[in-house]
Image (cartoon, rainbow, N blue to C red):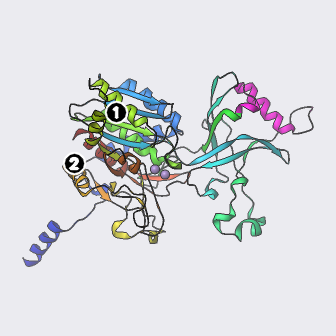
Amino acid sequence: MAKKKTEELKKKLSYENKNGWKLKETSKDKVFDFAETYKDFLQTCKTERETVEYVKREFDKRKKKQDFFIINRGKNIALVRLGKKSGMKLVASHIDAPRIDIKQNPLFEETEIALFHTHYYGGIKKYQWFNIPLAIHGVVIKSNGEKVDINVGEKDNDPIFVIPDLLPHLSHKLVDDKKVKDAFEAEKMNLIVGSIPFDDEEKEAVKLQVLSILNETYGITEEDFISAELEIVPAMQPRDVGFDRGFIAAYGQDDRICAFCSKEAFFDAKKNSKTVVALMIDKEEIGSDGNTGAKSRFLMDIVIEILKAQNIDATLENVSEFLKNSEVLSADVNGAVNPMYKEVHEKDNASYINHGVVMTKFTGHGGKYMANDASAEFVGKIRKIFNDANVNWQTGELGKVDEGGGGTIAKYLASWNMEVIDCGPALISMHSPYEISSKTDLYETYKAYKAFFED
Ligand code: MN
Ligand code: MN
């Protein structure tokens, strides 16, 4: 009897976080079906521009009658549904991902091979990008101003591109004996784009052959690269991982997993008191600068459009009032514990894959530098919303206190005097060309954002 009482007391007083597969509220079939839609989204959306286009197409099919969207320069989109109360419920994700960009003067020939010079974008481990199948996505603006879309490497019969690594037999001095951060030079990350010489030409004939194919296919010339944004991304498709198919491996899940869940939650939300907004931002991976990053005034445009739609004058006073009453989930991923590298985490404050959506009170590094650090009141409010909606959630810091760290757009959004907390699933191998997520976490993230919108 005493033993039973102790057990009851322990259950009542202790905090325990559960593996999502052990919860019975949602059927496995439903979770797996949801994951299939997600995989399709990831395969189509490998750049910020492609994501905006995809979400816009879907909006046209799934919008409710008063809904509207705002697009900023083809790289940000905000889906808006008006509410009666002042302020908004904003779920803000980012749709750029670590990748390799090509330089503005990319094409050169060396030992009769044509290559592109590249410039990596965001925090990558360079070695992960050698000798994997790569695709080229993006736009070229021609001298007459015309825009050409390029997307090569995704279809089964497309060619792919490769950054060639050095064979192990000759790697000793140049690679193996160096520290990893010095062993792979950015200037050696060049992409093979051609190998056949142009007929009747002696000098740089392979380069000319590539230029000639590009001109035939896209009508572009060498100078047009200067006004191009061509992104090199993994050509691999999203795939299930493991005999049980519980995980998904795919490129760009940081942070398109949150973008996907936010749009699904937006379209499916059954009610709302405040205005709800699903916002997708660019440039997070390089510090949120630029006119499409979270530091741009695009957020202000959204607020002004909402106030206009509500017949409220967008005076400074009204805008400030609206922002003050706004609540934000900074929808971004966390780093899940990798079983082989547990030592970079402190186990009681780490996030675990399969254990639900992660609430991160603060990110940053060291003594909470560069952190938003959500208030206890707001954390309490979100926790209640999630508990009331039976969302499987956990809390987690990004690694041990002095291990490293990282940031999100939370602090930029909080600077507008809104309540902000980071909230998204935890990934294994974040920022790699093939990141790993969990199907149950994907579904719980969707449930979390939907509950937040419906509150
Ligand atoms: Mn992110
Ligand atoms: Mn990231």
**Which quarter of the image is occupied by the C terminus?**
top left
Write down the region rendered in magenta: 200-224
Label 2 sits on residue: 385
Q: Which residue type does callout 2 highlight? A: Ile
Q: Which residue type does callout 1 highlight? A: Val
Label 1 sits on residue: 303
Q: Is the CB of mark 2 within 8 Å of ligand 1?
A: no
Q: Residue 209 colored magenta?
A: yes
Compare residues 154 and 66 and report the one nearer the observer: 66
Residue 434, placed above or below residue 12: above
**Residue drawn at the location 32% of the way across and 42% of the way down:** 30
**Residue drawn at the location 10% of the way across and 73% of the way down:** 4
**Which quarter of the image is occupied by the N terminus?**
bottom left
Residue 199, placed above or below residue 368: above
Residue 16 appears anywhere in the view:
yes
Q: Residues within 10 Å of mark 2 (few under 14, many from 20)?
A: some
Query: Where residue 81 sits: x, y (%)?
Result: 30, 30
